[in-house]
Image (tube, rainbow, N blue to C red):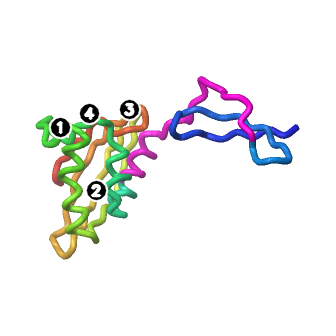
Amino acid sequence: MVWTFSWDIMSGIYLLHKLESKPLIMTAILENLTMPERTPEETVNANIEAYNARDIAAFIATYAPEAKFCKLDGTVLLADRAAIEGFHKPMFETVPSGRCAIPQRVVMGNFVVDHEHLTMDGRPDMHVMLISEVRDGLIVRASYSPL
């Protein structure tokens, strides 16, 4: 008898299947197994890849629902994921060639500190420092300062 595993993304559990002459038949559900979460660096990389692809859904999916977008001094500019989406969505639509490159990065525990080089459709390049705090595979706080 041959068994295979699959990940059910909707329920967040692994499924165990028995291979027979017919299509796969689910025969058991193994609970308490979870997919490993992304590392903080993987989460921030996914965020930048989505930013560069101008994929607002994938970009927003890297933020926790209660995520904050702040100045480095702590001033909250965008108070949750919906506000972050509301700010970025028009920019993604009106500046389709905007890109972010990371010339320097430091990763310390749950924090990713990036020097971001932003280019946007003939506008002057911007350089910012962005500190992303990641918990459970999602960005919970992004704090920036122009360089």
Image coords of residue 41 (percent x, y) = 43, 44
- Residue at left offset 24%, top offset 49%: 85
Q: Residue 137, can we see it?
A: yes
Taking depth in this image into account, of 50 and 112 the one nearest to the observer is 50
Give the Cα distance between marks 4 and 3: 12 Å
Q: Which mark is residue 79?
A: 1
Image coords of residue 117 (percent x, y) = 27, 61
User: Nearer the viewer's eye, disc 2 or disc 4?
Assistant: 4
Quarter in which the N terminus is drawn:
top right
Say whether disc 2 or disc 4 marks the residue closer to the N-terminus: 4
At label 2, counting other C-alpha atoms closer than 10 Å, the crowd grade (few under 14, some 14-19, many 20 or more) is many
Say whether disc 4 or disc 1 marks the residue closer to the N-terminus: 4
Image coords of residue 141 (percent x, y) = 26, 37
User: Nearer the viewer's eye, disc 3 or disc 2?
Assistant: 3
State the residue position of label 2: 116
At label 1, counting other C-alpha atoms closer than 10 Å, the crowd grade (few under 14, some 14-19, many 20 or more) is some
Q: Which residue of the protein is positioned furthest toward the right in this rendering?
A: 1
State the residue position of label 4: 66
**Magenta stretch: residue 15 in it?**
no
Q: Which residues are magenta?
A: 25-47
Q: Amino acid at mark 3?
A: Arg
Give the Cα distance between marks 2 and 4: 23 Å
Say whether disc 1 or disc 2 marks the residue closer to the N-terminus: 1
Say whether disc 3 or disc 2 marks the residue closer to the N-terminus: 2
Q: Amino acid at mark 2?
A: Glu
Circle 3 SS class: strand
